Image (cartoon, rainbow, N blue to C red):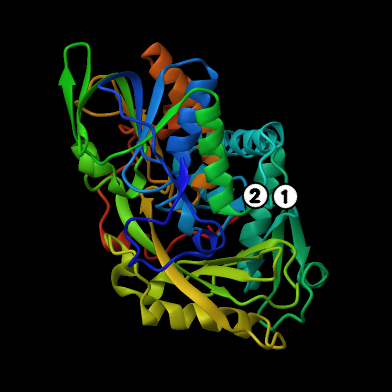
Amino acid sequence: MTAQRSADSALPASYWHATFTPPVPEDALPAEIDVAVVGGGLLGCWTAYWLAKRGVDVTLIERDVISWGATGRNGGFLTGGAAMGYGAAIDAFGRDAARAVWTLAAEGRDLAEQVIADEDIDCDFRAPGILSLSLTEDGLESMRRSLDLMREDGFAGELLDRQGVQALIGTPLGPEVAGGALAPDGGLLHSGRYLAAIAAAAQHHGARLCRAAVTALLPHGDGVMLSTSAGIIRAHRVIVAINAWSDDLVPGLAGLVVPVRGQILAYKPTTQVFPTGIGTDVTPTGEYWQQTPDGSIVIGGCRAEAPNGDVGVRDMVPTPDVTRTIEAVIPRLFPELDGLRVARCWAGLMAFTSDYLPVADAAPDLPGVWVTGGFCGHGMPFGPRVGQLLTEAAATGETPAALHPLRIGRETLTLLSPPDVLSEPGLVFGSE
């Protein structure tokens, strides 16, 4: 791979891309391959890594640069759970399914830390915890319920009163903060360097990383034919990991996995006051931020200010309405923190589902193809473990039982319309 800027230089650069130039895949694309992984984001890179480690002939195909989509434009959080509180997940899916999903996320978070150490990855990884703030007493009680259920099932978390929250933050709290919940093993990292290193490790273990746009998948004999901008290639099996663009290659996911624009900004470096990652619900669609080692504050959210919550939007450009609302979050909650100056604003595409659970399953009507996406802004913990399980699927031809909660045919997964995600649950522990 070479370190070059994205082909689409008109897009605003994220903090991660501005401080680490994303690499461009440059291996030659072969005419025939065993396993093709489409997409150079989190799930694609992790799947290619595990396939290469297993000794499988794998080629990752990315149309632009590594981390071009959601991973290179996110908040840099690595924590457990999904896009709702544990209590809400139990109510929606039952306890066994909720426990299984949380287990996938916990295993993925642990795998990420292990591989960061094993591969000697320099990505500013640290694990100070992730703090979810409650702005109401009712919200704090919801957190308490989720935490009680989580602890019963072996997942860690600590409820904090207002004083406990203040002890973790280096600037006085505003009057709204009632308390919070701490995920003690929650991690933070530099998303660009992290994913580039996973891709490089996959390449080191034998994966090819190629640059091309895949435009269609067609069953062909006992394999799959991929139509690409570099010509036709044939693969025995294919993993599609393009998230917000999933329905471009897997039409059966149209309306089930839907693009959603997330908008973020970074403040210029300032005094360190936020040692943990933080999430809260100033708006119905939630907010989240971390302070990086250089003192920059990366903060995103506030989709509720956009028409239809930015659901169905494929334009990765920030808008003034959402940006203004993001800028108001920290001054509102921490009124004595002065001197914040915006350094840059950007946007990226997440993908959502109607039930806030991702998809990882055999692709409908495409034999030999598996697809994953729809992580609802919480893909970072799932990526390593789901990639490992997709590796098993590609190697054996059978979808592992551990992916059953993420199957496409589950009853709770329905067609999604924009208002369905306007009231999004909270970051880690969530509201009920």
Residue 85 in the figure: left or right of residue 244:
right
Residue 370, image x and y in percent? Answer: 33, 27
CB atoms of marks 1 and 2 within 8 Å: no
Judged by depth in the image, the label closer to the viewer, 1 or 2, is 2
Identify whether 46 is placed above or below 393.
Answer: below
Residue that badge 2 annotates:
123
Residue 17, image x and y in percent? Answer: 50, 59
Residue 72 in the figure: left or right of residue 187:
left
From mark 1 to mark 2, how far is it between C-alphas? 25 Å
| Mark 2, secondary structure of its residue | loop
**Mark 1 residue crowding within 10 angstroms, few (<14) / some (14–19) / many (20+):** many
**Mark 2 residue crowding within 10 angstroms, few (<14) / some (14–19) / many (20+):** some
Identify whether 317 is placed above or below 394.
Answer: below
Q: Residue 149 or 339: which is nearer the viewer?
A: 339
Identify whether 349 is placed above or below 226.
Answer: below
Q: Residue 227 falls in which quadrant of the image?
A: top left
Under mark 2, the amino acid is Cys
Identify whether 183 is placed above or below 216.
Answer: below
Residue 175, image x and y in percent? Answer: 69, 84
Residue that badge 1 annotates:
157
Q: Residue at x 17, y 12 (%)?
A: 221
Q: Residue 422 or 238: which is nearer the viewer?
A: 238
* Mark drawn on residue 315: none
Q: Is residue 399 visible?
A: no
Q: Is residue 23 visible?
A: yes
Q: Residue at x 38, y 42 (%)?
A: 373
Q: Answer with mark 1 or mark 2, whichever residue precedes in sequence.
A: 2
Residue 206 in the figure: left or right of residue 399:
right
- Marks counted in the figure total 2
Under mark 1, the amino acid is Gly
Residue 155, image x and y in percent? Answer: 69, 40
